[in-house]
Image (cartoon, helix red, strand yellow):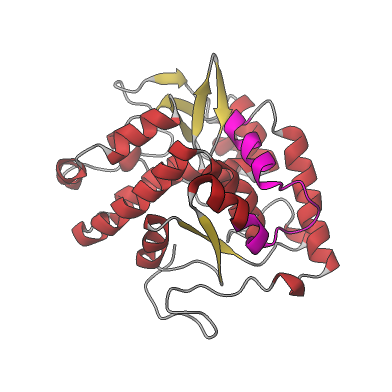
Amino acid sequence: MAEDSAPPAGAAPDWTISQDWASYSSEEHAVWDRLFTRQSRMLPNRVVPAFMEGLDVLRMSKSGIPDFDELNERLFRATGWQVVAVPGLVPDAIFFEHLANRRFVAGRFIRTPDQFDYLQEPDIFHDVFGHVPLLVHPVFADYMQAYGMGGLRAAKLGMIEALARLYWYTVEFGLIRDGGDIKLYGAGIISSYGESLFALDDPSPNRIGFDLERVMRTRYRIDDYQQSYFVIDSFDDLLRQTRDADLGPIYERLRGMDTIAEDAVLPTDGLLHAGTQAYAAARASG
């Protein structure tokens, strides 16, 4: 998401542009293939099974950057969602409006080889590989639409910042219970080789049971791996807690509360793992 402004030259009023799939170079397709191969080999026992099912339904193992026209035929049949290309980060209102109408915005550019392991602005690999497979799952697809509708309401109440924390700790960096295991489902983790390992295996971060108000108060890292991850019980429970909740009174309570530090553990937390925070400490001192 970005600050409100006019769409750039060449973009429609809703900030959409043509993907212009034919203009991708062989080098750009090769970067996608390298990223896809690395992640798809590492994820099967680490990611929620619905993600791998989504990859199959969308036939994303096909070589090269996906063509949105082909991708959308399969995605729309599954859950009524579509992927639309945008030139980069879009204003909050535009982002929420697209989600509320079952459209997922994706940047059309792909990282360069020297950005293989990290880039600050999300590219097409993060947006499409990380996010889109779970839009095949009916309940998660409904959650994303509900989030967009909630964003439009939050904007009117001046509570976008609190709602952004919910998106960050669920859609981007969420963990989920799968039987007796904890699995990945957040796109920011799934599209990152390093964080796919760190989020589940490293003793450094906290892993805390999901609580809506707790999440909406918790600050997050935009420059490195997260210091806390929140674990949902299921997509059905996530949808129930967010779509069915009366957020008005929650927002009013949050207005009078301080935010919570990224590494904090509260006495009321459903703590699954108390992190050592050794990774963050080492980075800070280095």
Q: Is residue 70 above or below residue 272?
A: below
Q: Determine if residue 284 is in view.
A: no
Q: Position of residue 229 (x, y in %)?
A: 48, 33
Q: Residue at image x 59%, y 65%?
A: 107
Q: Residue at image x 25%, y 37%?
A: 244
Residue ranking furthest to the front: 77
Q: Is residue 132 left or right of residue 213?
A: right
Q: Determine if residue 75 is in view.
A: yes
Q: Position of residue 155 (x, y in %)?
A: 26, 60
Q: Is residue 173 magenta?
A: no
Residue 38, quarter of the rendered image = top right
Q: Is residue 51 magenta?
A: yes
Task: Name the quarter where the N terminus is drawn.
Answer: bottom left
Q: Is residue 173 above or below residue 3?
A: above
Q: Is residue 48 left or right of residue 167?
A: right
Q: Position of residue 280 (x, y in %)?
A: 55, 38
Task: Name the quarter where the C terminus is drawn.
Answer: top right
Residue ranking furthest to the bottom: 9
Q: Residue at image x 61%, y 56%?
A: 73
Tell me the magenta residue range: 47-72
Residue 68, quarter of the rendered image = bottom right
The one of 72 and 228 positioned closer to us in this rendering: 72
Q: Position of residue 105 (x, y in %)?
A: 51, 61
The one of 264 and 233 positioned closer to us in this rendering: 233
Residue ranking furthest to the top: 180
The one of 249 and 215 positioned closer to us in this rendering: 249
Residue 41, quarter of the rendered image = top right
